[in-house]
Amino acid sequence: RKARQAKQPRNEDFPPNIERRERIIDLSDEAKQGLKPIGVKITERLCFEKPHVYVDVIKRPQYVIAGQPEAGVRSAPPPLSIIEGCKYDFSVIAAIAAMKFAFHMPTYRQQDWFGQCGWFPSRSTTNDLINYAVATIGPLDRQMWHLLLRQPILLGDDTRLRVLLRGALDKEQLENLGKRSLFRQAAENGKPPPGSAASYAWLYAGLDGFAPYNVFYWSLGHENAVIDGHLAAYRGTFVGDACGANARLEQRSGGRIVHASCNAHARREFVKAESNDPILASQGISFYRQLYDVEERAKTLDAAGRLALRRRDAVPIWNRMERWLAGDAAQAALPRSAI
């Protein structure tokens, strides 16, 4: 049995970077008569103030050259704004975008949140400022994607999302969906489209030493053409699971992209098979446990150090696993069994 760990005392101290405002609560002058001070008892409690906004009044003195009206009026340039003439500072736009995308707060709730400080923005104003923010980061997004496509190894995955469309698809979008799509079948049969559909978010990630970015794309369908379009300009090794869209990526690209299957996904299949064939499944998992140990030791190394460590310690494990897969016990597994 594991020894019961001693309870660690909870640290109730507030971070030192938080602003401190001192307040002295003392006895009255009458109550202090005849008393000798021996020290000060200090306690701290955290306080919260409602959101605060202020109007930045910008004054730019204007000048002319005496007797030279053709020289025009001169003044210091105005501070930068997200678009010309915008009355809202970057701090307001950053707060709205952060609440929307980081804290999942819809714009109608943001109206109430800002209302605490006396500013009641319309929903159209908050939506416009979100659109300004999205348009502004467009070049950054394209630069991140450009750098991802230049690296030799690209990591990828996708996940299913339920999306509410409310009849937002036009005829051209319906034609681009797969033949098995419920939307396309409904349109061909003259029926109204369903109110929601399965959509997909595609993640592409880089390695720390090259381009440590995460870039997401969204699509309604899960056809091969989606990922083929994303990676149309990529040349290198794509690391991902063996789902339908990835399975023949190498063949469809004519060898331009090498598909390296994901071992985290492969290991899961052995875990699922433990109830069906616990002996073979545990043996397969043991190889991955050894490989994960090598990767744990490789975390503090640079790329060259990791390569040397994997060649020395991981390759022999893979060779033993290959011999195990080709052995009599693994070959005796039934084709339809989980293992």
Image (tube, rainbow, N blue to C red):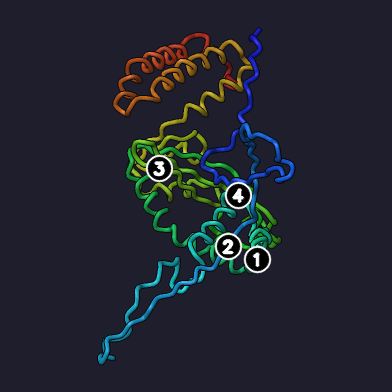
Which residue type carries mark 2? Val
Q: Hey, what amino acid is under mark 1? A: Gly
Q: Which amino acid does label 4 sit on?
A: Phe
Q: Name the secondary structure under disc 2.
A: loop
Q: Mark 3 points at which residue?
A: 252
Q: Do the residues labelled 1 and 2 touch (CB within 8 Å)?
A: yes
Residue 184 rendering spot, x and y as whole percentages: 62, 56
What residue is drawn where x is 49% and y is 64%?
Answer: 89
As drawn, the residue found furthest toward the right would be 31
Mark 4 or mark 1: name the one nearer the start of the chain.
Answer: 4
The three-letter code of the residue at mark 3 reads Arg
Question: Dot 4 corresponds to which residue?
Answer: 103
| 195 shown above or below 280 | below
Q: In this view, does 211 lie to the left or right of 115?
A: left
* Disc 3 packing (10 Å; few <14; some 14–19; many ≥20): some
Nearer mark to the viewer, of 2 and 3: 2
Q: Mark 1 points at which residue?
A: 118
- Residue at image mark 2: 53
Label 1 near label 4: C-beta < 8 Å?
no
| Residue 68 percent coordinates (x, y) | 25, 90
